[in-house]
């Protein structure tokens, strides 16, 4: 864990990155893959009677927030992000949600405020996950469910030679993706990856994740970690339309990918973490 980086430098880096990429962020993460991943993650929230107050942690420009507010009418949706530029776009896209600019580890919410908290690609931006989990426990109601989706610390990503090989194999896919977007948009616009990198940005290892979950096990009723997605992220890059044959082809790829991920978990690109906190008064 990168504990030597100044916290103010981390926050400043995140805000700078948000300002730099805010205008491109929405389109980058509005592919068929991310749409399906958001649907799967929110589907993990246990069914409960009555309205649920849900927090989108690190909401960016509101891709997940929009899905929560539009497709889950029983959710009272709140969203938080450190970047004001991101939040301005999110507010325009999802007027039904309530947005707050804040650091995730120091949220302004009252205690026991939420029934569910969802974070897409947020943990690898956090300097101290223990500090974040302590804050999330404070604002969680008894039995609250946390769902995180993160880049996987797979064996594939640990070996640079394998990564280089797969990049070479997939280079035609990336070229076709650029060409198809160029035909659609007139020019290919994508997020500059270097602008995404902040002092806290890192890959969370399986060992670190296991250690954090173990330290917080006294407050956890259940925890499920699953690694998924080998082909879907790359295949969806070729499918720029969200209807017709593109959606059908992606649906087929998605179901094949679910099977492959169970057989070859070491090649998975994403990890989903579902945590349910204990009910009040229960050991």
Image (spheres, helix red, strand yellow):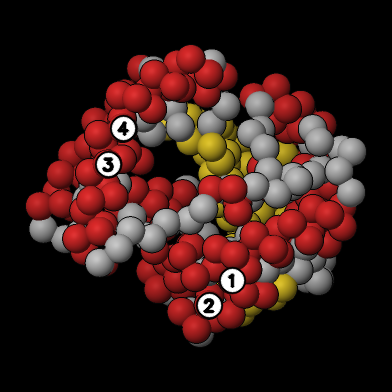
For label 4, count other residues whose C-alpha is less than 10 Å away and answer few (under 14), some (14-19) or many (20+). Answer: few
Cα distance in 3D space between marks 2 and 4: 32 Å
Please state if 254 lies on the left or on the right of 225 as rendered. left
Please state if 139 lies on the left or on the right of 175 as rendered. right
Cα distance in 3D space between marks 4 and 3: 6 Å
Rendered image: mark on residue 171: 4
The residue singled out by tag 2 in the image is 89
| 24 and 127: which is toward the camera | 24
Cα distance in 3D space between marks 1 and 2: 5 Å
Rendered image: mark on residue 272: none
Front tag of 1 and 4: 4
The residue singled out by tag 1 in the image is 86
The reply to whether dot 4 and dot 3 touch (C-beta < 8 Å) is: yes
Quick one: quadrant of the N terminus? top right
| 175 and 45: which is toward the camera | 175
Quick one: quadrant of the C terminus? top right
Q: At numbered mark 3, what does the secondary structure look like: helix, strand or loop?
A: helix
The reply to whether dot 2 and dot 4 touch (C-beta < 8 Å) is: no
The residue singled out by tag 3 in the image is 175
The reply to whether dot 1 and dot 2 touch (C-beta < 8 Å) is: yes
Q: At numbered mark 2, what does the secondary structure look like: helix, strand or loop?
A: helix
Cα distance in 3D space between marks 3 and 1: 29 Å
Cα distance in 3D space between marks 1 and 4: 31 Å
**Residue at 69% of width from left, 63% of height from top?**
16
Q: At numbered mark 4, what does the secondary structure look like: helix, strand or loop?
A: helix
Front tag of 2 and 4: 4
The reply to whether dot 1 and dot 4 touch (C-beta < 8 Å) is: no
> Which image quarter: residue 219?
top right
Position above or below: 137 against 70: above
Q: Position of residue 120 (x, y in %)?
A: 55, 51
**Residue at 54% of width from left, 37% of height from top?**
151
């Amino acid at each position: 864990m990168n504990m030597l980086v100044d916290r103010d430098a981390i926050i400043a880096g995140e805000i700078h990155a948000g300002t730099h990429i805010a205008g491109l962020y929405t389109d980058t993460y509005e592919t068929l893959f991310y749409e399906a991943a958001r649907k799967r993650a929110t589907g993990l929230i246990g069914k409960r009677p009555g309205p649920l107050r849900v927090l989108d942690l690190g909401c960016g420009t509101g891709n997940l927030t929009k899905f929560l507010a539009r497709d889950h009418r029983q959710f009272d949706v709140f969203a938080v992000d450190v970047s004001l530029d991101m939040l301005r776009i999110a507010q325009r896209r999802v007027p039904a949600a309530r947005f707050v600019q804040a650091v995730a580890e120091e949220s302004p919410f009252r205690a026991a405020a939420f029934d569910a908290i969802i974070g897409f690609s947020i943990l690898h931006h956090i300097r101290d996950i223990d500090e974040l989990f302590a804050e999330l426990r404070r604002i969680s109601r008894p039995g609250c469910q946390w769902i995180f989706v993160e880049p996987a610390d797979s064996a594939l990503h640990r070996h640079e030679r394998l990564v280089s090989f797969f990049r070479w194999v997939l280079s035609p896919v990336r070229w076709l993706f650029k060409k198809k977007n160029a035909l659609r948009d007139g020019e290919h616009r994508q997020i500059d990856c270097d602008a995404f990198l902040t002092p806290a940005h890192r890959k969370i290892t399986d060992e670190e994740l296991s250690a954090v979950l173990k330290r917080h096990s006294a407050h956890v009723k259940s925890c499920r970690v699953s690694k998924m997605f080998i082909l879907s992220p790359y295949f969806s890059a070729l499918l720029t339309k969200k209807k017709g044959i593109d959606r059908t082809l992606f649906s087929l790829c998605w179901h094949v990918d679910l099977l492959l991920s169970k057989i070859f978990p070491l090649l998975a690109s994403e990890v989903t973490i579902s945590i349910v906190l204990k009910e009040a008064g229960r050991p």
